[in-house]
Image (cartoon, rainbow, N blue to C red):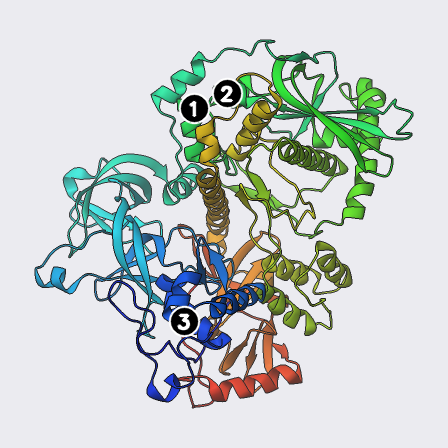
Amino acid sequence: MTRIPRDPTERPGKGAGKKNGRAAKPAPAAERETIVHGAVPPRDVLMRFIAENPQQASKREIAKAFGLKGEARVELKALLRSLEEDGLVEKKRKSLVRPGALPPVTVLDITIRDIDGELIGRPAEWLDDDGVAPAVLIKQSAVGKAKGKTPVGGLGDRVLAKIFPSKDRGGPAYTARIIKVLDKRKDAVLGVFRPTPGGGGRLMPIDKRGEEILVDPDFTNNAQDGDLVEVHLARVGRYGLPRAQVQNVIGSVASEKAISMIAIHAHGIPYVFSERVLKEAEAARPATMEHREDWRSLPLITIDPADAKDHDDAVYAEPDPSPDNPGGMIVTVAIADVSWYVQPKSALDLEALKRGNSVYFPDRVVPMLPERISNDLCSLKEGVDRPALAVRMRFSKEGRKAGHTFHRIMMRSAAKLSYNQAQAAIDGAPDDKTGPILETILKPLWEAYRILTRGRDRRQPLELNMPERKIILKPDGTVDRVFVPERLDAHKLIEEMMIQANVAAAETLEQKQQALIYRVHDQPSLAKQETLREFLATLDISLVKGGNMRSNHFNGVLSTAEGKPYETMVNEIVLRSQSQAIYSPENIGHFGLNLMKYAHFTSPIRRYADLVVHRALVTALGLGAGGTTPQEEGALDDIAAEISTFERRAMAAERDTVDRLIAHHLNGRIGEEFDGRVSGVTKAGLFVTLPAYGADGFIPISTLGRDYYIYDEAHQALSGEKSGLGYRLGDPVRVKLEEAVPLAGALRFEMLSEGRKMPTATRSFHKAGRRERPGARKRPGTRAPRGRR
């Protein structure tokens, strides 16, 4: 996606914006006279100032820069609020930034050197889903260069840096000055060993932004060609390739084990528990009945995937006997009491916070907690006493909640079922295990689900149709097949009951005025809404205007597209328009679920956020040991920020692993043709998804043909200037696999399908855009430069 262009406006005039003895650069004389010092500047001038002066973008600094006092400051506050509501600026901490812009102080990961040997970094946390994280040039001081000093920070380091907009239009968008090195490059580096003639070898990077490393003949540790290895850096100089010695041979890159390890190392995911953590886990003993109610006779059951190794939630439903609630149901959700075993500031707690969540790969899990806790003491095993926190919720026959209560209990699961097993029983095919509990347990659960569905239909959460693909591996770790699992009512039943339990947790903690971490999801920004609205207009689908958008408005769009050739495309575009759900101690509600109060409570084995909520409930309700400490309450802002980052880290690692597995799987099918669908349109070319595999590949714009192709963002299309033929988001296409790069998880295709005729309006737009495009080639028939994924 393209960024919002910088506004062609001015900076404040002479004398404005002084900070640390320096003044902001004055505007040219011809433009300066339009700014009155002491008066609120026009919107475009203010946006330009915010974009070019991120270090002075708080309300206080803006007022100082323009010399605003008294009533003018009130006008400025109103103007800034207006810009924020319109999606033209957004607040990050105390400063305002343009959407997609970096804050004035940012954590950067130094990833590569450019052709001049300068260090290039990228933001460690990038929340803009519309594009690649911007590059940042790490500047050295002139004095340091003159004295030949090695710059602070090096490849692989994580640094805290001061950010400045770049004046060089041809280079990175930002420059930076390092304030502090937060994390030096680790000695252990991962790569693929390739032998060289005469002995020794080179370590090929697993990241396309990495650099090669030399391995001397005496330090190969018997690594073979194609082995994934960990090396210890022996020398890192400013010039020339670094040298290293192989410490550990993980295995061939053809195995899934190696591919998972690539993602684990590339994203810095902790995967080895320390001896102290393991000892603490082994020393844990089963919970006692202290401060617990005995619910062992209540036939709670677990329903999970067939291959699940831990079971942290159990459910039960029964008709409400109260005459005040005819036809209503009581739903009970019990969740493993992890807070009993993982006490604040213990070794287990600190390790869990460092991980943030469990990470799931096709054949392994990197757990948040050791198996002694997650798979044993806190797993709600069938027929075994286990401690839990339970919520008992009363619902009317219309699906409205009439009340709820929380309890700290001891339970004993009556049955462990898989989703397919439970569904088969309801569909008329019970087995030896489900037959005896069909009438007493399963049918009441499904009756409760029908009631909850009425409430869900009335609430109208966002109903995206985005099927998830699952990879099945062979015994050797390679891909066997990729398929879309059937979405069963059993899945939806558990999902809806967990949502209601999460709502109840948030409501109880708010009522008790107990600090907690919410799961929040903001509505789409006005800028993203407008982009979506413009695109939908090309399909003759309307989207209401206004800032008070609700999830049912998007559901109307999805309903209009249902059954149409562009249904999948519209679902994807609506998904891209949404904000990122995060954790926060400040509640703004959950837009996607259309809920005002929502907190994660149901998976404390695999999510630290849920553990925080459990502790808050224990404290608020006086349920005994394992509650929130004052220190933890004071750190909720930092905890929420960290676990939000770790969640994104886990998602990226899981996605990268799937991409690499599919690239490995297709590596032997170069030259074959596939049916695909255009899933992304950029200035550099097209992204094409193979629906049968869930894999994305790239087609550089230079390979599309002899026509000059121009990017139309509003219509999400590339269209030929002469022919008027082009490709649009969602188009079905036939492609040929030209290249697979398994280590990077990248595929490159050749387009076989002829483009379709673009709408007249689109072609007119292209003609105008072609004339105005800076630096556009004048000779007809030439092709745009080759793009990169």
**Hey, which residue is sitting farthest front in the picture?**
70
Q: Quadrant of residue 492?
A: top right
Q: Position of residue 122 (x, y in %)?
A: 36, 56
- Per the model, the C-alpha gap separating discs 2 and 1 is 10 Å
Q: Nearer the viewer, residue 70 or 576?
A: 70
Question: For mark 1, what is the residue?
Answer: 348
The answer to which of 582 and 440 lies nearer the viewer is 582
Kind of residue at badge 1: Leu
Query: Could you tell me residue 695's position as x and y percent?
Result: 54, 54
Looking at the image, the residue that sits furthest to the left is: 147
> Is 656 placed above or below 675 here?
above
Q: Residues within 10 Å of mark 1 (few under 14, many from 20)?
A: many
Q: Which mark is residue 373?
A: 2
Q: Is residue 283 left or right of 454 when viewed as pictured? A: left
Q: Residue at x 46, y 44 (%)?
A: 645
Q: Earlier in the sequence, mark 3 or mark 2?
A: 3
The location of residue 218, given as percent across then percent down, is 15, 38
Report, in whole angstroms, how far the alpha carbon at label 1 lies from the one at label 3.
47 Å
Instruction: Please give left or right for residue 195 compared with residue 226 in the image.
Output: left
Residue 502 visible, this orientation: yes
Q: Please state which of residues 218 and 382 is positioned toward the viewer in this rendering.
A: 382
Counting residues from the N terminus, which is met first, the one under dot 2 or under dot 1?
Answer: 1
